[in-house]
Image (cartoon, helix red, strand yellow):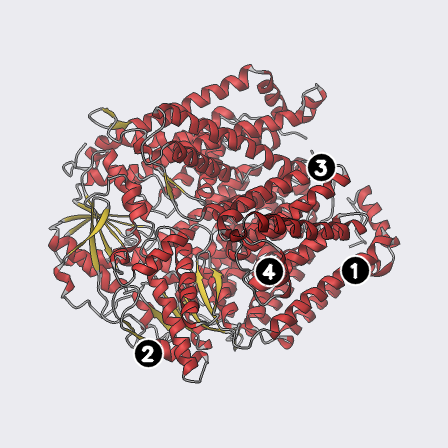
Amino acid sequence: MHTQEVGKPMDIFIATLPQQIINGLTLGAVYALIALGYSMVYGVLQLLNFAHGDVYMVGAFIGYGVMMAFIPESGPLFAPVIIIILMLLVAMLGCGVLGIVIEQFAYRPLRNSPRIAPLISALGVSFFIQNAIQLTLTAQFRNYETEKLIAPAAGIDLGFARLSATRALVIVTAIVLMIVLQYLIKRTRLGKAMRAVAIDREAAAMMGVNVDRVIIFTFFIGSALAGAAGVLTGIVFTRVWHFMGFAAGLKGFTAAVLGGIGNIPGAMLGGFILGLAETFAVGFISATYKDVVAFVVLIIVLLLRPRGLLGARIPQKV
Amino acid sequence: MSQGRKPLLLVLVLALLLVATNAVVFAQAPEQTIKVGIMGPFTGPAASIGQEQLNWAKLAVADFNAATGWNVELVEGDTQIDPAIAVTIAEALISDPEIYAVVGPAGSQEVEAVAAAFVDARLAHISGSATRPSLTTSGFDTFFRTVPTDAAQGPTDGNFLAYELGVTKLFVIDDQTSYAVGLADEASAAFEAAGGEILGRESVTQEDTDFSSLATVIGASGAEAVFFPGQIASQGALLARAFAEQGIEVILFGADGFFSVDDFIAGAAGTTEGAYVSAFAPDIHDLESSADIVARYTEQYGEFGTFGPPTYAATIVALEAIQRAYEAGELSREAVRDQVAATDQELSVLGGPLAFDENGDVLDASFYIFQVQGDNFVLVPTSADEAEPEATPSS
Amino acid sequence: MSQNKIGVDQWVEQYDQRVNKAKGLQGFIARTSQRLPPWGWLIVLVAVGALLPVITQNNFAIRIAGNIALMGTLALGLNVVVGYAGLLDLGFVAFYGIGAYTYAYLSSDFSGVHLPTWVSLPIIIVISALFGLVLGSPSLRLLGDYLAIVTLGFGQIFVQLMTSLTRVSLPGHERPVDLTGGPNGIINLDKLSLFGFTARTVTDHYLILLVVLAVALLVIYHLNRSRIGRAWRALREDELAAEAMGMPTRRLKLQAFAIGAAVAGFSGALFAGWQGSVFPANFDTTLLISVYAIIVLGGLGSLPGVVVGSIVMVAAPDILRDVTLAGTLFYVGVLVTLIGAIRPRWQTALLIGLVVVFGVIVRLIVGALDAQALAEPQLSNSLITNTVRSWLIIPVNATIIGNYAFGLLILMVLGVSRIKHSVWRLAALVPTLYVLIFVWETRLSQEPSVTRLLFVGVLLIVLMIYRPNGLLGQKRVEIV
């Protein structure tokens, strides 16, 4: 798709639409993974975990560290696939543990407090992580050296658009993770317990569900997904830095609400829709008003469906 | 409950005493404590720029202290790029009588918010990065800067694109900072005056990392070149990567902030090859006269871009002005301000003479346009070098 | 506050009894504070506040006090929306911005209009309240956190529009028009002028803000005790029940939004007049976080809490800016925490002694292994710092080792807080404290800007854990 002739707006729209869909799906895959963690935690605790974006940032840095460790000047030590899988696994594990630690120390003591208290301690955690990273790793931007793993030229030229191998990797990885998550939640005992706790924590506890274990599990999975999102962001957009979690966290929150907060397929759908909405805003309206367009979409959706796209109409508890 | 209370009170009293005695010792410190303030975004979204400036200022103070045997302290004021915080910090620096000069603030909007307070306090402040033209023409006689204004750089860039590169269709991006918006406006005006056509103007934020959809738009617009005077070099690299990924061929032209070997060349993995960057400072990596400073900076703090060295220059200007005022026997803020105005360095870290005009702008500002070739920036000779940069600022 | 016992549960009842029984100074303070009527408190506040410019000529101190009053007023508005009506409004700062920008339009060369402040203020209040109604209307349909995200979006959109509405094509204009000044904002605003009095110095502004805060406290206090205030609380506790009791919940919500927005717009106007300029960056999410922290730290719904919260949230970060003072506060803070947390008290002395011995041993070991690794301590103006630095080991490559020690410190602190057995805990505290001091001297004291925010983060977490209802919040029964 080399520089094209300037045509009518409609022609440009049709010509660039496929490429913009690819762009939007990539962005949406990342948003969806972040939104999942938000939504899962919300589901079991009704807590807006504002430190979630920073967990994602830590994931991106862990991935960066692993990548640098296995790609010295002389070239990659293993096959690229193995390195990428390692990056994902280490980041997911690290972030999962981080999520559990955050839950244990910042949220658990506040479990029976007014709802806004953990919100503030979440902000405290977010401040702490961000500045701890800046203190130890400085405020400099780091660049993933993706090109040493995946050749920039690799990809499929569809004629009307180009799907690079990196983007394909990101989208496929995200979808695989989502399928695994669905399996965990639908088929395993812990997953079932998680759904039970989400519906009614006290009733679940009375039925013998170990609520604490479920909450730890939820934080682990949600944070691990954020870690994966961080690594995928690094692979496709290359730049990582200490402040990246802030905006990403807000996007994840938006996507989770868009889909119906607490609803897991909703978070996935919300992520993809938000990614596409932002991309289309840049592509066909204006890059300047990207966030405005995204929020207007959100507001319209919520006005039509006050509980998000897939949010269930649970009768209000009295 | 009640028996534990008295010791607690005792402890509090003791603690207060401790604070008080420490303060007393503090007051007995040598009378000749001299401090220099620095204001910039050292945390938050713009921390990468702020920290680079802070590190250069630290180095300047260390160099000065080593050379003179003085013990000047650097006082940090973190503005987090919010003008309201900058105002509070300005007040903090002003109310410390041991501070004789201030470096910064970094952003033009911060300078606008604090300049009046500094005028009232007669405290000189020298920015190494605020480029909005109107800052030096608003009567703030305590404000100086070691970088030329957008009114001077913008036309250079616009003309270079139109005349030297022969571009007729340009796409312009800014990053919503007062720096980038100002420079983009000035360059667009010059480019249009030269007969070129601006196909689009978009804004991104400094937090953006996904430039793929914007790249698609630019590719479809038929633009021959993109002018993106962003502050964050890695964003230039991200845009270049997005172009390469989609096979779009346009000339990328950045400014100042993009001048970073690490982020704009190494971080782009070859996709910025051939891109242009105009800079208000020369590449001090290659300056023989600054090699020593560069080596010490790199050893302590790592790589750097263009925002740091002008701050080093600004810090040195402040310190030398204090030294001259002290040696002349009158160490006061007013005297230091006068000495800053009288600055006449033969060779600054930026590789040339450094002096200010009556408004506080650098005299004989010159610009450098570089092209990315291989692993380095290569200076491009331009005809604009001889042309006198326009002195009349517009706001 | 003791006169209104309706809705007070058993716990509060017991608390009151305990307060009444308490002896000594603390009991005296507690009882006086309960006996002093609200207007008495207000007089104390204004009197103490008005004394400040008499005590100090330091403009920085007065400016911080002014910031406290300004943030306090702003937080009062949010307190109405969140604390009383229970609506999670994350777009609140936008109203502050709307007030500030309206002030800029009404009193600057940017628009060519120059109204005196006492004329522009009522206009600003009305405009902000109208915007409050606009934003409030979706709250009729949305619940809880869905409202939060929509209002958050509103706040973001406001900042975005103020940043980018610089090239707007308007009918009747040939060239695009600059509506907001973009990131450069609107500068050279008129000074605040109230009935012939023009504010010029920092002290002038401070006094105006102090009076404004007092008036706002008075108004909100009476509002809260009125019919509408009781209705809001009912709404917050249980919307369904309130509706069933025949309360006009829609109208109540809208009223809360409008009043909160009016207070915010009003404080925004004063802010703009004081700063003399407005910029989009003034109304970022950081401000929103601060205002929320103020009302939650102080105690949601508590008016004295708002004042205390804004003192903590505004003054603490600014005090930490002073490196020498921050160092002293750090050591004093550690000491006070230890004394407060460790019983019996002689163990604290033992602990400190052990840490000193531990430090000497470490010094000896490192000195014996590699004397080259130690750097000459850099002395400063502080007695404490100098004492500590001559005892501690400061390695040559302090930054890198300090960074690792920082990571280790986090793990150690987390670990120590999990140890239940008191002897083991004391033993574990020794190296932890040593590493803490080491990290402070090698890293934290070197990076004051970052350290400041680290501490704000820790402060938020710790305060919330120990006072989930805020410093002055009333503990009340939560409805599950």
Chain bearing mark 3 = C
User: For the point 19% across and 41% down, which residue is it?
Assistant: B221
On whether disc 4 and disc 1 are found on a single subunit, the reply is no
Residue that badge 1 annotates: B9
C430 sits left or right of C443 in the view: right
The label number, if any, that marks residue C419 in the structure image:
3
- At label 3, the amino acid type is Ile
- At label 4, the amino acid type is Ala
The answer for how far apart the CA atoms under marks 2 and 3 are is 64 Å
Q: How busy is the neighbourhood of tag 1: few (under 14 within 10 Å), some, or many (20 plus)? A: few
Residue B46, image x, y percentages: 41, 52
The label number, if any, that marks residue A163 in the structure image:
none
The label number, if any, that marks residue C326 in the structure image:
4
Residue A99, image x, y percentages: 56, 34
Q: Secondary structure at mark 4?
A: helix
Chain bearing mark 2 = B
Q: Secondary structure at mark 3?
A: loop
Contact (Cβ within 8 Å) of mark 2 with mark 3: no
Residue that badge 2 annotates: B342
Question: As drawn, which residue projects farthest toward the front?
Answer: C368
- Above or below, B29 against A182 in this view is below
- Tell me, yes or no, if residue C354 can be seen here: yes
The answer for how far apart the CA atoms under marks 4 and 3 are is 29 Å
- At label 1, the amino acid type is Leu
The answer for how far apart the CA atoms under marks 4 and 2 are is 37 Å
